[in-house]
Each structure stands twice: as C-alpha cells, then as structure tokens.
Image (cartoon, rainbow, N blue to C red):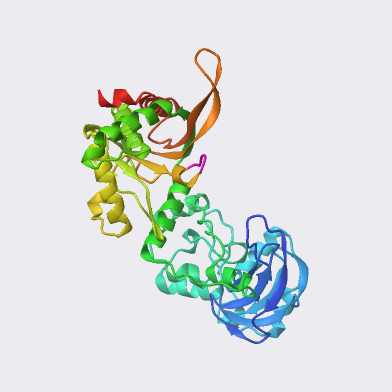
Amino acid sequence: MPTEILMPALSPTMEEGTLAKWLVKEGDTIQSGDLIAEIETDKATMEFEAVDEGVIGKILIAEGSEGVKVNTAIAILLEDGESADDIGAATAPAAPAAAVKEVAAAPSAGAGEAAAPAPSAPAAADGSRIFASPLARRIAADKGLDLSGIPGSGPRGRIVKADVEGATAAPKAAVAPAAASAPAAAAPAPAGPSSDMVARMYEARAYEEVTLDGMRKTIAARLTEAKQTVPHFYLRRDIQLDALLKFRSQLNKQLEGRGVKLSVNDFIIKAVALALQAVPDANAVWAGDRVLKMKASDVAVAVAIEGGLFTPVLQDSELKSLSALSGEMKDLAARARDRKLAPHEYQGGSFAISNLGMFGIDNFDAIVNPPHAGILAVGAGAKKPVVGADGELKVATVMSVTMSVDHRVIDGALGAQLLQGIVENLENPMVMLA
C-alpha cells in the first residue's frame, strides 16, 4: 500500500524543522537516493534523500511550512501498480501501534501479490510482521534472503530496496543471531555538514577555495581519528628555567668555535629521552591488542611546514650528546621544510614534543599522534613571581608544559612519574650530562 514519507530527524536533537523547498512534484518518479526536498533546521538547510523508489502520489506539507514535527507524514509514495485511489488508506486516521505494524508489512495487491485472505508478508522469529516494501520483498525473494536478518533504513525501520541490494543470502539459523545483535550496532555519526552545505552557507560571501592536498587530508584524517579514539588525559606542570638558561649560555660560549648553538628545545629533547629511560613502562606504544615497550628513546618533534607539519624522529636520543641532537634536529627540520625526509625519518617513535613557545604561546594541549603514548606541549618561558624554597618571593623564568597521554598505555600515576622526570632534568640540566 502507499508509503508515508516522514519528516526526517537530521540531527540527534532535532524535534521539528521547516520544509523549505520541494525538489519534486506530484506524479514524479523517484529512485532511492534522489533528492526530494530541502529541510531547514535551526543550524542549517539540508537536502533530504528518498530511501525508496516509486511515484510521488501526494504532497501533504506545502513548501515553507514551519514547525513540522519529526516523523510527521510530508508526502505519500506510490509503488508499482498503485494509483491515487489508494492514497485514502494511507492518510486515514492513525491506527493502534499493533495494527499499523501489520498494515505497513502487508503486500500490495496492485503489485501482483495476493491481498486476501491472509497476508503473505514475512514475519520475524517472534511472529511479528516485518516492515518491507514490495520491491524489497521481491528482491529478497529473488536472492533467497531472509528479511528477518536485515535491518531496515526506511521510515519506522522499514526494509527498502537499498537494504536488500547489497545483502547476500545466508542460512536462517546463521542470520538470526545477527538480527538479535543488530540494534547494538549503531550507525557511525556524521562527521559534519557536507562540503556543498558549507559552500551554500557562505555563497553570499567572497572566499577562495583551497583544494586539500594529500598531506592536509592525512593530517585531518589521522588527528580526527586520534581525538575520537584515543582516551586522552592531560598533566600540567610549570618548570623553572633559570638554571637551564644559565647552563645553556655557558655551553654555547664553549661550543662557539665549533659552530654549535644549543636551543632550549635541544635540552627538552634530551630531558624527555632520559625520562623515558628512567620510567621505562611509559616508553611504550599502543599496538591495538597489545602494548609494545620500547628499549630506546626515539623522540619525535613536530616541525611546522607550509600547509602542514612533519614529526621527524630522533632515534636513540638518550645516547646522543646535546650537540649531536642539536645538529640532527636542525638537519631534519630543514629537510622537513623542503619535504625531503625519507619515510623512516618521520615514522615511529614512542613520544612526541610540540613546542610553540617561540610564537609566544603560554600553554596549549596537543593531540596524541598514534601509536605514540604521549606528547609534550611546550609553551613560552616568561618571567613570573614564584615562592622560593625558603618561602621568599622571587622572580623566575617559568615555562608551562602540558603532557597529553594515551590512557590505554599510561595511567595517571605513571604519567605523573614521567612528567616529574622531565621537570627534574630541565630544572637540573647538569644531570643530563652525567
């Protein structure tokens, strides 16, 4: 019998919307996936696709209608063999839920199926009727499919053409457990509005469209996945840098003849590398169904380049001198900006550093880059009042750091130990040469 096309819920919180525009008219033949209307919510205008094929028999809600409740019938869809005369039954007052379920599953006489005395529509294992369009039932019959094992994507869970086209036949005994578990498998949430929708939002404004290159697409995909799937937690510390800055100045004077100039970042790399050795359980990576504890401290450092970033890895950082780390980092950063790094130079590592202090950023939270177990976000050093060990107020150069941690690999106490090791190395830099 005729099918109601219902007002869709275009977001989990949508309760009503405006039927802004019909893209079809009565008498038009539509296919599954065709755009049939534009629906306005409080945030956007979205296109509404048909979930089944047929003929638009009657439009029930006019263009421009506001406050249309979700699941309100907005049009009637006729299937093969049906005519406008059949619409009366579809628009009759609502029947009790049990009766509606039977009517929705009943085969259409116009489709060449027996209309009486007993409907031949398939039933689920518990005896209840199955919501399915005549076309979906015909395709299922041709393919030998058991409809009780196929979840429907149409209105009120109705099985439509698209649901059965990609399905393959299986023994009923094997399908039943899948049907029982189907409700637990939720469809993935949409990532956001489509590119066309966003473009329409700004069609009245001047803009330049920038096509995403492979790097930008990879960054977007990996960091979106990381933020959604990695259980982050964050640990924050302030580090007093005065001893490190004084020690660095002395070393740079002595290394001047060799053309070496150490940066604060070189000390941070060394401090992280040694802390990973002191807290070996934190020197690990997530491998899906296991954790890999690394022997060496392979530290990745984020390097900004035009249009993206690289994270070259300094392998065996705990074994290298500060001057060796400095030279290697400068070389990797230069080749990263020229996009001349080999894959093995930016893959791997167990821990990363992202330093935005040179841009005046006080503090920030970085996203863990899987399979790393953590990343240290480094802010700028600034003069601040602090309370000394003797209780007296003094001025010190303080740097704020935030360590983002993958909780699957590192628990809170273990992460605190690792960060404490980093802080101790930076506040007592001479121990890093011992």
Give, as a single range, the part of the protein colored magenta.
361-365
The front one of 170 and 418 is: 418
* Quarter placement of the C terminus: top left
Picture coordinates of residue 162, whole percent (x, y): 49, 71
Q: Is residue 426 above or below residue 359?
A: above
Total number of numbered discs in the rendering? 0
Residue at the bottom extreme, as displayed: 27
Q: Quadrant of residue 428?
A: top left
Determine whether, in the image, residue 275 is placed left or right of residue 343.
right
Query: Does any portion of residue 350 appear in the rendered image?
Result: yes
Give the answer, above or below, for where 258 lies relative to 384. Answer: below
- Whether residue 282 can be seen here: no
From the top left corner, tell me how far across and down residue 134 is, in percent.
55, 74
Q: Is residue 147 magenta?
A: no
Determine the residue positioned at 68% across, 79% down.
22
Q: Magenta part mainly helix, strand or loop?
A: loop
Residue 363 is a magenta residue: yes
Left or right: residue 59 versus residue 359 is: right
Q: Which quadrant of the figure has residue 203?
A: bottom right
Frontmost residue, 196 versus 318: 318
